[in-house]
Image: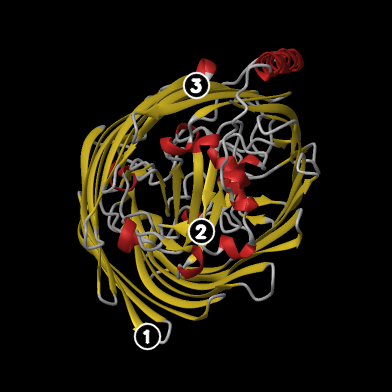
Amino acid sequence: MCIIRPWGIGAGADADMATKSQQFLLNACAWTAALGSVLSSSAIAATSLNEMSIEELAQVQVTSVSKHAQSLGDAPAAIYVIGDEDIRRSTATSLPEALRLAPNLFVQRMDAHQFTVSARGFSGPETSNKLLALIDGRTIYSPLHAGIFWDVRDMMVEDIDRIEVISGPGGTLWGPNAVNGVINVTSKSALDTQGGVIRATAGARERTGAVRYGAALGDAGAFRVYATGFDREDLPGGAAADFPDGSEGIRAGFRSDWASDANVITVQGDYFYNDLFAEGGDTGHNILGRLTHDFDEGSALQIQAYYDKVDRQFIGVRDKLETFDLSVQHNVAIGSHQIVWGAGIRTTHDLFVNLLNGFQLDPPRKRLWVGNLFAQDSWALGGSVTLIGGVKLERTSFTGIQVLPNLRIAWKPGEKALFWAAASRGIRTPSRIDRNLVFPGLLESESFDTETLTAFEAGYRGQPWERMSLSISLFYNLYDGLRTTELHPVTILPIRLDNGLKGHSYGIDAWGSHQILPWWRLSAGISTLHKSFHLKPGHMDLENGISLGNDPDFQVMVRSQMTLADRFEIDVMIRGVDSLPDPRTPGFVDADARLAWNLDDRIELFMIGTNLFHRLRDESGYTDSGQSVARTISAGTRLRF
């Protein structure tokens, strides 16, 4: 119905691919030889998830479930944690590729630079709009269509400390769009990244490079600076006709941290530019400041503010967004109660111009506001039972006050088992397209209201056997007010966007790990989804349920991580995805692999291969945007000094 982004003008001809890759890899090898003689003997020592035992993994600290630090084994939610070592030992060179490691996310590659990411359904380039993602507390979904443009929301993967992926609503703590899940990306403190890292990869379809350097600032502070770059070739045509979709780009930034007995101060910022060649380019920057103060009585206060600007320009279209956000959070323990409460306000100012067709936003510029007040209490009842209750009051420019409640109960009968259940409400407030998209005489959309979810969940997390961890979550979701495209009830035209669909979905998210041998860890995960939706009385849908997305009934993954003689690493991940119903796309089984040789603690050489079982295959099936996913082989090096 409307074009969010035309899918690309691409890079050079196939004949140039090998030459570019060879030259890039020769340069990388030259860097390795030159730097090998001057690298410091003190390598960076980091405690990674892969180096931990199964028992230690249960004690990893997470913050996304309750907005305060708690061990993973105590978190009453379907949460999966991707650690920094998981990312290093994967084939990922970008953030959306790293998200494939989470079994409770469905990640689709649309073309050489575009991805869609969803949890518990609604996958698609314009329907993945019920997922909230944050990078270091900075919300990254677009109010244009409530989705995420992942190609402009990337970061240096070596800077990622962990990615916490929650399946299920998180609106009580996180607000709008936290309907089906929350992705919370946390980067490493500058205090933990002193020294240098250089990474380079080269393959027939992609070249990447990254450099980072950090150092101390006095006795209590540290800083780091980084720069990354990439050059991605076109992908071949798939469900959509072949068109140039390659791109290249740069990203640079900094982070500084100061820590004292009572205060932690963080200041960080980024700049990026992506060149889509003849199509146009994207540019943007952001800066964030955060102060955390610990009081003597054990409570903590956090104040955070950030400014974010993204300007996307391509043939005939400009999408510009400026965001300012201020939030305050207070955590306090009172007897058997762990209370977190706070408030926040966010304002966005946008511009959307479309010269490709008659679809416009009216007005083309608009300032939106979101304000909230929230509180949640974790009450230890005794008998290893904890009751968690909370509510958020939220008001936006398009809605009145919305109430987002959450009730959870957790029972921990022993140190190695947690049972939990939850009932909660999530909302997706109208986006600019939902409310302001017009086509004179054909479309109006002022009547669209909030989409709602009432979710019921139950789960288990624990260590049923020695050297094994397991998480199982069941969910039943009730949706109401999902988007439909309908005729005007009186005049037929203009058509309008309305809230005419309702229904339910249910399924299972499960994953586990087994330390088979000291040098071999095997992990597996499965996610299932069953949907049933219907039109509400008096409604119709000219687009036949397109807002429901295109989802597989199940997906499975198995990951093997082997460390041989402390120097050689062999990592393999096999993914299986069921067929997609509309547009019909065959299911597939595919594999990614990485073979690495650590010459010492400072020099790492590796080969990576993605989509190894197929030379080409369809992944999305969309006839207006889906390009084929191709088998790729790359070589790389990572240096630490």
In the image, which disc is placed on residue 540?
none
- Dot 1: what SS? strand
Residue 169 visible to an observer of this rendering: yes
The residues tagged by marks 2 and 1 sit, at their Cα atoms, a distance apart of 24 Å
Of the 4 image quadrants, the one containing the C terminus is top right
Which amino acid does the dot numbered 3 rest on?
A: Ile
Residue 537 visible to an observer of this rendering: no
> Are the residues flagged by discs 2 and 1 in contact, CB closer than 8 Å?
no
> Are the residues flagged by discs 3 and 2 in contact, CB closer than 8 Å?
no
The residues tagged by marks 3 and 2 sit, at their Cα atoms, a distance apart of 33 Å
Residue at 56 percent across and 24 percent down: it is: 210
Residue 485 in picture, x, y percent from top left: 40, 53
In the image, which disc is placed on residue 60?
2
Residue at 69 percent across and 67 percent down: it is: 467
Task: Return the residue nearer the eye: 188 or 588.
Answer: 188
Residue at 60 percent across and 65 percent down: it is: 55
Task: Return the residue nearer the eye: 79 or 298.
Answer: 298
Question: Within the image, what quadrant is residue 501 found in?
Answer: bottom left
Q: How is the image coloured?
A: secondary structure
The disc, 1 or 3, on the residue closer to the chain's N-terminal end is 3
Residue marked by disc 1: 382
Which amino acid does the dot numbered 1 rest on?
A: Gly
Question: Within the image, what quadrant is residue 298 found in?
Answer: bottom left
The image shows residue 548, relative to residue 638, as above or below, that is below
- Dot 3: what SS? strand
Residue marked by disc 3: 250
Task: Return the residue nearer the eye: 36 or 622.
Answer: 36
Lateral position of residue 195 relative to residue 610, left or right? left
